[in-house]
Image: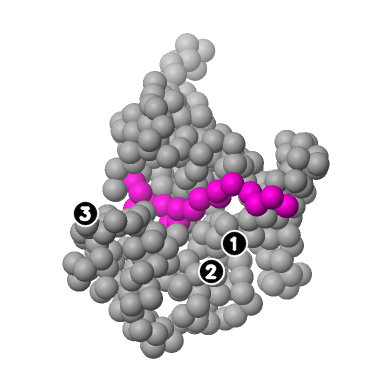
Amino acid sequence: MHIQDKLGSLLNQLNTVIVGKPDQIRDCVACLLAGGHLLIEDVPGVGKTTLAHALSRTLGLQFSRVQFTSDLMPGDLSGVAVYERAKEAFVFHPGPLFAQVLLADEINRASPKTQSALLEAMEEKQVTIEGETRALPRPFFVIATQNPLDQLGTYPLPESQLDRFLMRISLGYPDRAAERALLEGDDRRALLEQLPSLLQPEELEQLQAAVLAVHTAPALLDYVQDLISATRNGRWFVQGLSPRAGIALLRAAKAQALISGRDYVAPDDVQAVLPQTIAHRLQTLADAGRGAAEQVRAMLRAVPLP
């Protein structure tokens, strides 16, 4: 099957489960094709967990889910070594982290100690347990959900962890037509159980390789650098983007271009993924009077196209 046909099938299937959110579905697929981790921030009950389940089933990946709570310990994620008398040795029992897709549900309800235990796993694709380094399955994606910070019992994610997420998206409430379809339609859990997997792991790796092969012209790289420089000039944000954030932005734009059926990145691709890719890495100035995503859009309008 041609790459575009595969991607079209993926998007169509996901849109049958999460109705009325085609842009957010596209962002999710772009994020995973770019090899990044995804943060979904929203109020409870709008389909965050359902979307994570649908993504893992559609992509044919091994899935595990952890409900983050204030008493969750790092060992609950990574697993523990238990002494077995019959073997006269410690035997490692892997935790839920050893899956291809980890749904970290309500990640900001866990303590900072447990949140930081995810950092090595997300960045290095490995964990160190009792001095021994163990590789995680490939591919390895974290799809984390979090509630808005004004809800009780939540801890803000540290900047170092937010930076490990390629994208942060919000689903928001459905429009009237989409909500009607939800009210009249099948139960979402029943729909999830019927979803076929549309990709084999090696096909997903081929798609990720195709993302890396998408061409970026020098003029496009100039535009990306202009946007990065704008975040650092002190007019829009307290601190600018790091070089790692710039690389992440370019990877996301390449994935967006591939989904759009092109083998080169256009300015439209960069603009389409910019707020979702950089807003969670930036802090607005005290007198800005608007959120980071709105500030990114204002900056985008101010930076001229190549």
**Would you say 84 lies left or right of 247 here?**
right
How dense is the environment of label 3, judged by Cα within 10 Å: few (below 14), some, or many (20 and up)? few
> Which residue is at 67% across, 46% downward?
54
Residue 177 visible in the picture: yes
11 inside magenta stretch: no
From the image, state whether disc 1 or disc 3 is nearer to you: 3
Residue under label 1: 23
Instruction: Give the extent of the magenta segment.
Output: 161-177
Instruction: Choose between 75 and 20: the one closer to the eye.
Output: 20
Quick one: quadrant of the C terminus? bottom left
Disc 3 to disc 2, C-alpha distance? 34 Å
User: Which of pointers 3 and 2 lies earlier in the amino acid sequence?
Assistant: 2
Residue under label 3: 286
x then y, percent, for residue 66: 52, 31
> Which residue is at 58% across, 73% downward?
258
**Would you say 233 lies left or right of 140 here?**
left
Instruction: Choose between 64 and 177: the one closer to the eye.
Output: 177
For the residue labelled by badge 1, is the local secondary structure a helix, a strand or a loop? Answer: helix
x then y, percent, for residue 304: 35, 84
Disc 1 to disc 3, C-alpha distance? 30 Å
For the residue labelled by badge 3, is the local secondary structure a helix, a strand or a loop? Answer: loop
Q: Quadrant of residue 23?
A: bottom right
For the residue labelled by badge 2, is the local secondary structure a helix, a strand or a loop? Answer: helix
Q: Amino acid at mark 3?
A: Ala
Residue under label 2: 255
Which of the numbered marks, if any, corresponds to residue 15?
none
168 inside magenta stretch: yes
How dense is the environment of label 2, judged by Cα within 10 Å: few (below 14), some, or many (20 and up)? many
